[in-house]
Image (cartoon, grey):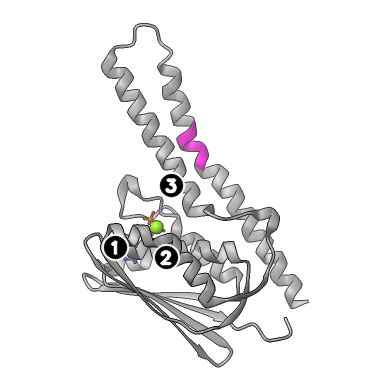
Amino acid sequence: INQRVMEAEKMEVVSHLASSVSHEVRNPLTTTRGFLQLMLQFDLPEEKRIQYLKISIDELDRANEIIRDYLTFAKPASEKVRQLNLREEVFRTLQIMTPLANMNSVEITTKLGDHFINGEDHTFQQALINMTKNCIEAMPHKGVLSIESMERHDKVLLTISDTGKGMTKDELSRIGEPYFTTKGREGTGLGMMVSKKIIESMNGTLDITSKLNHGTTFHISLPLANEKN
Ligand code: ADP
Ligand code: MG
């Protein structure tokens, strides 16, 4: 029964994410359409044409960002909860994030064991991507991203830390709130909400500690899969 409940909750998260993404993406698309329509005007001055094109490109970039925070990998049709090796999932995520880390001169260190958890690989990777991306973005001119794991009782504790800009108390209390971002037009304020939902759907918890100008740590706790399921 427990497994059934978990699957049902899982599907709810997925369908919630899917309906959110269409809702979120509609705004920039509607704006883009509006400006393209304006460009149909006869005798539009050159500077207006360029302005409208710039806005349209901006809005399309925004739609793309939103989709990236929500579903880099999500394939709702193939959702399958199975036993995952935490270390493998982290390494897959790091492969994807390495180019961004290199761009910011961020060094990546890991201390990971083989821990087995129940989850859907792409969904879990989405949560890891959103968190590691935030860490790297908090270190624009170098730093260290470190990821470690350890088992305690029937749980695995995964910590993702950066040596970046950190957060104020107010920022820390608002992280994960939908649309809360300090990145202006570059941010969506959706990444952490998505990560938290995904971890909770796996019966895990996410806690965050941060020190301004020193760095941030994401503390993730997930139930270990027992051999039978
Ligand atoms: P976005 O990255 O689009 O702003 P997120 O939901 O991923 O949205 O993050 C929300 C906000 O939380 C960020 O804008 C930033 O202020 C803060 N934040 C998240 N992770 C970190 C981090 N590792 N270091 C510092 N601030 C962070
Ligand atoms: Mg983010």
For the point 49% across and 33% down, the residue is 29
* Left/right of residue 218 with respect to residue 7 in the rendered view: left
Q: Residue at x 70, y 53 (%)?
A: 77
Q: Is residue 128 above or below residue 75?
A: below
Amino acid type for the residue under numbered disc 2: Met
Task: Indicate the quadrant where residue 182 lies.
Answer: bottom left
- Give yes or no for residue 26 being in the magenta stretch: yes
- The answer to whether mark 3 is within 8 Å of ligand 1 is yes
Q: Which mark is residue 138?
A: 1
- Magenta-colored span: 25-29
Badge 3: residue crowd in 10 Å (few <14, some 14–19, many ≥20) = some
Ligand 2, image quadrant it occupies: bottom left
> Residue beneath label 2, please?
131
Q: Is residue 64 above or below residue 165?
A: above
Distance from disc 1 to disc 3, alpha carbons, whole Å, reads: 17 Å
Q: Nearer the viewer, residue 17 or 99?
A: 99
Label 3 is placed on what type of residue?
A: Glu
Hey, which residue is sitting farthest right in the picture?
Answer: 1
Queried on whether the Cβ of the residue with tag 2 lies below 8 angstroms from ligand 1, the answer reads: yes
Q: Is residue 159 above or below residue 180?
A: below
